[in-house]
Amino acid sequence: MDVGSDELVSFVGSQGAFGAFASGTRILESTGPVSRVDDLVEEGGVRSRIYEVAVQSVWHAFDHPVELGVWSGLKELSCSDTNDCLVVRCVENAARVPRGVEQHSRGGIRYLVLSQRTVAGAFAKDWRVMMQALARALFLRSDEGRLEIPVRASILGLWYASALSATGSGFQFAYDSIQHSSYLYVYDAINVSTGVSAGSTAFRKTNALPMVDLKWSDSSWSPIVNGFITAGR
């Protein structure tokens, strides 16, 4: 198992799952065949594939959920980063900000001041409430009712989708391009959190967030990664 970042990786997305994968990763399709992420990017055809959606609300099992991607995702949005404190711009149409979070206004623009301790404490109390509040304060909600999340901070979109799934409201992912999506769109109150969903996008991009390159040979083990069920190499 190797940990790294700033590598050229393959992003694959469906209506119910999305994320970055190391070269050579194999994803199981719902009917049994295996898709290699490199082939999906280079040869296309992702929209003809059907995948099982395996989003699970198991985040409560982790001792330090904020360190598992949330803080890194918030850093991608930060306009100021000092030690364990981030300053992040709040979207104009945000109706409210997370409870207990400090905010300031300058030039008509609202900013949230997020400390790692405050965020971690709110997640420990109820991560589902805090994640939904953060997402709705930080990301633009379009007229169509979707949250528009930059791919560089897509880990926050996955957490947001998990929070929606955990509260039973459901979600659906969409993208602005098949071959190079800049945004992860999240619609809430649409239940594709279970069952299967069609492939929607596959592209290659530099990923700055930490990644784990995990290799195994036991064919009976199929880890869930970014909502997809993966297969051994």
Image (cartoon, grey):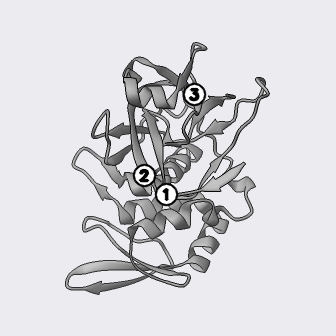
The residue located at (51%, 60%) in the rendering is 131
Disc 3 target residue? 27
Which quadrant of the figure contains the C terminus?
Answer: top right
Q: Where is residue 146 in the image (x, y as percent from the top left)?
A: 32, 47
Please tell me which residue lies in front, 82 or 158: 82
Q: Do the residues labelled 3 and 2 touch (CB within 8 Å)?
A: no
Mark 1 / mark 2, whichever is N-terminal: 1
Establish if 84 lies above or below 8: below
Residue 29 makes an appearance in the image: no
Q: Do the residues labelled 1 and 2 touch (CB within 8 Å)?
A: yes
Mark number, residue 36? none
Could you tell me the amino acid type at mark 2?
Answer: Thr
Mark 1 / mark 3, whichever is N-terminal: 1
Q: Are marks 1 and 3 in contact (CB under 8 Å)?
A: no
The residue located at (42%, 37%) in the rendering is 172
Could you tell me the amino acid type at mark 1?
Answer: Asp
Q: In which quarter of the image is residue 14?
A: top left
Q: How far apart are marks 3 and 2 (CA)?
A: 20 Å
Q: Position of residue 162 (x, y in %)?
A: 55, 47
Q: Is mark 2 on a helix, strand or loop?
A: strand
Q: Tally the marks.
A: 3
Mark number, residue 206? 2
Q: Point out the frontmost of discs 1 and 3.
A: 1
Mark number, residue 6? 1
Could you tell me the amino acid type at mark 3?
Answer: Ile
Instruction: Determine crowd level at label 1: few under 14, some 14-19, many 20+ residues with C-alpha closer than 10 A.
Output: few
The residue located at (76%, 23%) in the rendering is 219
Please tell me which residue lies in front, 92 or 24: 24
Mark 3 / mark 2, whichever is N-terminal: 3
